[in-house]
Amino acid sequence: MSTPPLIADALQPDQPGAQASPDASPAPRAVAELLICLPALTAAALPSALAAIAAAFPTESVLVAAAHLPDNPADFPSLELIPYTTARSDVGWILAAADYAAAAHLARERNVRAVLLLGGDSAAISEPNALNAPMLRSLADCIRIKNIDLVLPRFALGPHEALVNSALIYPLSRALFGADIRFPLPIDAALSARMAERLAITTQRLIALNQGHSLLWPVAEAASAGFSVREVSAADATPPTPPPPQNPTDFNALFASVAGSLFADIEAKASFWQRVRGLPLRPNLQPDPPALSPLEASSEIHSMIETFHLAQDNLEEIWSLVLPPQSRLALKRLSQISPDAFTLQPDLWARVVYDFTLAFHLRTLNRSHLLGAMAPLYLAWVASYLRTVADDPARAATALELTAAAFENEKSYIVSRWRWPDRFNP
């Protein structure tokens, strides 16, 4: 491997291996104020990622931390390359606690102003436009020019994409933490120095418990710290997606990992979100958006509804420990509706999620069993949502707004149940 530029620049003419220039010595390289941390890419995927970074910042020095250095670092003269070791989470493509800790350590060591922490895996990063220059530039500029603490990309998602985000993460982040960030799932993030340090402090306990693979939720962390949060358009970028489940067990594990981590974060920040007011009504949004006309159910939707029907028969005892009678009665009625009329109303879904969040906090039953019992209810929401929106982006946007608004409207429900759980026992 040839000598990396960072090392070569440090060599003096009287040191072995250094070449004294007969002319004036070269101008010193500017100290990098931007650190970009890459996931563990393969040797084949690394060059395209570095090329995208170099194209995004053609006139400045950028510090890039990667698990493996390229064979020819001189091909990227504007990049200072350093080794970077971290841990991927259980679900592989989402940023984990150890990622933030490692990035914060490098940021502190190099005294940088901004950190771009990129998730995903080798396959995702090597896809065309997965790591595009305009998105990288927008993320960095929002931190350095506008002095924002946390910036996340806003991906252009299709009606059938990122449904866990749409059903749980976005509406909960918006209702409880007042953060209208459409894609708060932690895949890529731009951090100010103080935001990176804040997340590093948050991770210390997890790493001490050998839980560096655990997920963190930077949007909630920024909101609770009073830090600024923004999103930038990433319309040309494709967010990495989890591998398709080979069986229901794989899906249940993925759902439990994400939902459990989210509920744990909500539990830890309960004193904050109970005081947060909801977002102001958007000027172009009607107070009561019109209901959507349902569409015919497909075979995929039939399968999800059948899973819900089986759960209604087999999990009724567990659901009775979590859900109040009115919610159980509404679900019972839903299980008797034909697939072509199957509709899980947003307000019912919001209360169900809040009830499971509270049961997670109270440890009403084993948390793994609890999250497993919630998965069929999530599939019922997906079936209802897909039957309503089909492939229409406009219908999807309206449906998601109705869902998020329901979580905001039902926030008083979770606040009351959290403060006085015995008064609302099922």
Image: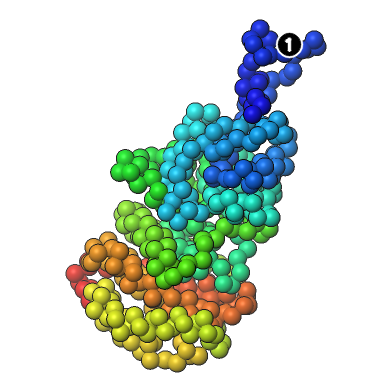
Residue name at image x 45 percent, y 80 percent: 304
For badge 1, the amino acid type reads: Ala
Q: Furthest-right residue in view?
A: 23
Q: Furthest-front residue in view?
A: 1
Would you place residue 20 above or below residue 30 in this image?
A: above
Q: Is residue 181 left or right of residue 135?
A: left
Quadrant in which the N terminus appears: top right
Q: Furthest-left residue in view?
A: 422
Residue labelled with disc 1: 20
Would you place residue 384 above or below residue 230 in this image?
A: below
Q: Is residue 273 visible?
A: no
Q: Furthest-top residue in view?
A: 14
In the image shown, does 265 or 412 lie closer to the viewer? 265
Residue name at image x 65 percent, y 21 percent: 8
User: Where's residue 309, x and y in %?
Assistant: 37, 85
Q: Secondary structure at mark 1?
A: loop
User: Where's residue 261, x and y in %?
Assistant: 37, 57
